[in-house]
Image: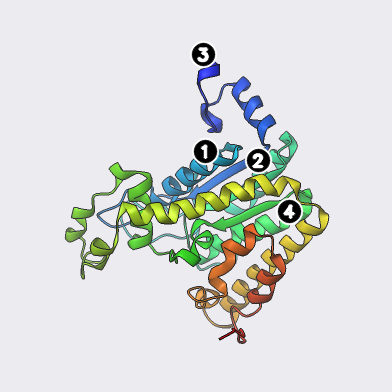
Amino acid sequence: MDLKTRETIQWERMLPEEFRAAFNRLPVVYLPLGTVEWHGEHNALGLDSLKAHALCVTAARQSGGIVHPPLYGGMGGLHKPATIRMEPEDTWDNHLLRPWLEKFCGECHRLGFKAIIMLTGHYGHNQQIVVREVGARMTERLQSPVLGTPEYWLALDVGYLGDHAGIGETSLLWHLEPDLVAIERIKNDPDYGKDGHIEAGSSPELGKKYADTITDRLAKLAQAMPTWDFATRSAFVRAERALVSAQVRGWRTDQPWAAWRKLRTPPFTDYGRLLVAERFDEIEAFAEKLVDGEIETSS
């Protein structure tokens, strides 16, 4: 094999020389997260991890960096066939995912990586909280930036608002892994196929629109994060902690999804754009309004 003609950014497929070369180009690691879970008759059961991994691979091809194999195991999951539920969704306790992520971040820091991006394709509210909270806390502990976010948060402003086997997820997988979507089978699904809107609204072209936005922003973040100084990292942590605080407060005072109600409207949809622009103070400011209060908008 001629290593000079082969290029891979997937950790598990690298020979040591390839790992060293990729690490020297950009010491950033991507960690895709998901689960195996029912996603309708029309989608592959591994949709969450499959799309997160494919997005990370595409981004790393643009930015450099190394993509770790996806983690198939998350919090929550539907009460449906062929679904693995590692931990309950509606619980304050977390005994598997949080310590695993913390150990992973610590190991990557030990190996010399200068930034970590944890991208979850599984959207249970507690999954989102744990991944983001670990990212903020490990940034402080390691003094190296760690981002933990669902992929759809990076494309809210182009219309991808997160769903479960709906138009967004189906379109993304259709674009990223076209052989793993059988849209015609949705007609046999009494839940996802009952009114025809997912079949009519989904397309690989729409998936490409979402994927291009997500991967472009991931690539820019991967290149920028290793350069963040103490002040920038501190502002990033304050913003991410503010989001976690709003999510937890809404869960405690109202219901688990309370902090997600406003994500469909500006300025909350601007998260991905503001994150890449390092306008963390604006993220922190709107995070305080996710659960209560009003945002002033210009007319």
Give residue 2's mark. Answer: 3
Query: Of label 4 and label 3, which has the lower sequence position?
Result: 3
The one nearer the camera, 203 or 166, is 203
Q: At x 50% / y 58%, what residue is drawn?
A: 75
**Label 4 close to label 3 by CB (< 8 Å):** no
Q: Which residue is mark 1?
A: 69
Residue 38 visible here: no
**Label 2 close to label 3 by CB (< 8 Å):** no
Q: What distance separates the C-alpha of mark 4 from that of mark 2?
A: 14 Å
The amino acid type of the residue labelled 1 equals Pro
Q: Quadrant of residue 178?
A: top left
Q: Which residue is mark 4?
A: 139
The one nearer the camera, 16 or 4, is 4
- Closest to the camera, between mark 2 and mark 3, is 3
The amino acid type of the residue labelled 2 equals Val
Q: What distance separates the C-alpha of mark 1 from that of mark 2?
A: 14 Å
